[in-house]
Image: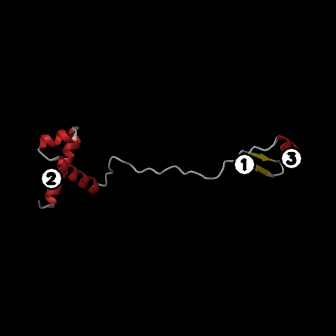
Amino acid sequence: MIITKENDTEKFAMIERWQQSKQTISQFCVEENIATHVFYYWHAKYRKQNNKPGAFIKIAPPVISHTKPNYCTIHFTNGIRLVFNEQPNASFIKQLL
């Protein structure tokens, strides 16, 4: 098969007919007498040329911090801040206040 610009236009028109038909690819291919693998080839070429993404979208994984979360923070009025990564002893906190 020789691929020409006219052939591209013809096949891309076929893809647009399928999109408007609301049929499944299998139904459309049977009706148009086209092998499904040929349809998929032209559909991929059509998407690539028209910059249309496929059915999947790229997502980024969540950012996971490997640092331990702070258990508690005490802010004093003079601007000093104490950060505890573990539960402090109550008597120790009492001494600070």
The image shows residue 37 at horizontal and vertical percentages of: 19, 49
Q: Check whether the beta carbons of the residues at disc 3 and disc 2 lie within 8 A of each other.
A: no
Q: Residues within 10 Å of mark 1 (few under 14, many from 20)?
A: few
Q: Quadrant of residue 6?
A: bottom left
Q: Secondary structure at mark 1?
A: loop
- In-image side of 45 versus 88 (left or right): left
The image shows a total of numbered marks equal to 3
Q: Residues within 10 Å of mark 2 (few under 14, many from 20)?
A: few
Q: Check whether the beta carbons of the residues at disc 3 and disc 1 lie within 8 A of each other.
A: no
Residue nearest the observer in this picture, 81 or 37: 37
Image vertical order of residue 84 relative to residue 7, above or below: above
Q: Secondary structure at mark 2?
A: helix
Q: Secondary structure at mark 3?
A: helix
- Residue, x 71% and y 45% (percent of image)? 71
Residue type at tag 2:
Glu
Residue type at tag 1:
Asn
Q: Earlier in the sequence, mark 3 or mark 1?
A: 1
The image shows residue 51 at horizontal and vertical percentages of: 31, 55
Q: CA distance from mark 2 to mark 1?
A: 67 Å
Q: Which residue is mark 3?
A: 96
Q: Earlier in the sequence, mark 2 or mark 1?
A: 2
Q: Which residue is mark 2?
A: 10
Q: CA distance from mark 3 to mark 1?
A: 17 Å
Quadrant (top left/top right/bottom left/bottom right) for the C terminus = top right
- In-image side of 74 versus 60 (left or right): right
- Residue, x 19% and y 52% (percent of image)? 12
- In-image side of 89 versus 40 (left or right): right
From the image, state whether disc 3 or disc 2 is nearer to you.
Answer: 3
The image shows residue 57 at horizontal and vertical percentages of: 39, 49
| Badge number at residue 85 | 1
Q: Earlier in the sequence, mark 3 or mark 2?
A: 2
